Amino acid sequence: MAPAQGQFSDQTDGADSKDSEEGGSVPPAFRSAVDALHSARLRPELEVESTRPPKRLAPYAYALEAAVVDGEDDLADGRLVLLHDPAGHDAWQGTFRLVTLVRAELEPEMASDPLLPEVCWSWLTGALEARGLSYGEAGGTVTRAGSHYFGALGARRPATQIEIRASWTPREGRGGVPDTAAHLMAWGDLLCQIAGLPPSGPTDAAVVTLPQRRGPQVS
């Protein structure tokens, strides 16, 4: 990633909509929600840029990707997609939906923790709640996968990756627009937490954090 840290790069391919393809107008609520994303104040360790969103998930979509960077190392990365259906969606219980994928490599001492999936899911909900955000219909998966290397790659240490796939409905505020900037900041908090960075402000003593990683290790 090449964008400036803690802010968006100047990309224009992050939005996709039926109307834009047909020369029509974008709903004001969706435009406002996307504009708000660009006003979010993010931690300097985050590199964020817009990217092309998936098609056919909703009439309107906007996507961004981010990485937590420490020097030359990417400690964690993820993708966040904002979906909008002006007609509403029964499964969402609203007109907006946020969908995410977050992943990071784990230190060996954390990889074997049987409670790790529950802890990782609590990081997502905790990040939203710490920002005072109202949301609903949250669901997702936490996957832990291990890799062992053989042959020409046999010198590499075994690695374990954690992956969170989730979606939730941000509650809409004035004008039917959710506070997407605050949701993005909460998502950035999640990325930094799964990367093992210390919190940027006061945190609950009960919150568990990963040890800070040092980048890929080869023995």
Image: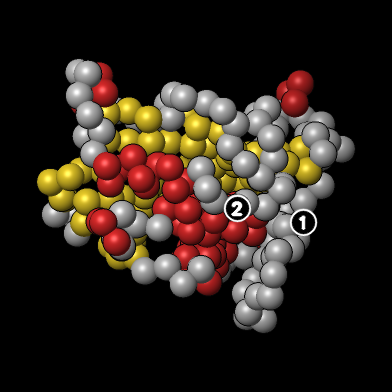
Q: Which residue is drawn at 29% across and 61% down?
A: 174
Towards the viewer: 174 or 216 = 174
Would you identify the image quadrant in which residue 15 lies?
Answer: top left
Amino acid residing under circle 2:
Arg
Q: Which residue is drawn at 47% across and 46% down?
A: 37
Disc number lying in front (1 or 2): 2
Amino acid residing under circle 1:
Gln
- Of label 1 and label 2, which has the lower sequence position? 2
The single residue placed furthest to the bottom in the displayed view is 205
Disc 1 from disc 2: Cα separation: 23 Å
Q: Which residue is disc 2 drawn over?
A: 41
Q: Which residue is drawn at 51% across and 43% down?
A: 38
Q: Which residue is drawn at 62% across and 41% down?
A: 7
Crowd band around label 2 with a 10 angstrom C-alpha radius: few (<14), some (14–19), many (20+) = some
Crowd band around label 1 with a 10 angstrom C-alpha radius: few (<14), some (14–19), many (20+) = some
Residue 172 horizontal side relative to residue 123, left or right: left
In the drawing, what numbered circle is on residue 55? Answer: none
Q: Please tell me whether mark 1 sits on a helix, a strand or a loop.
A: loop
Towards the viewer: 124 or 38 = 38
The single residue placed furthest to the top in the displayed view is 22
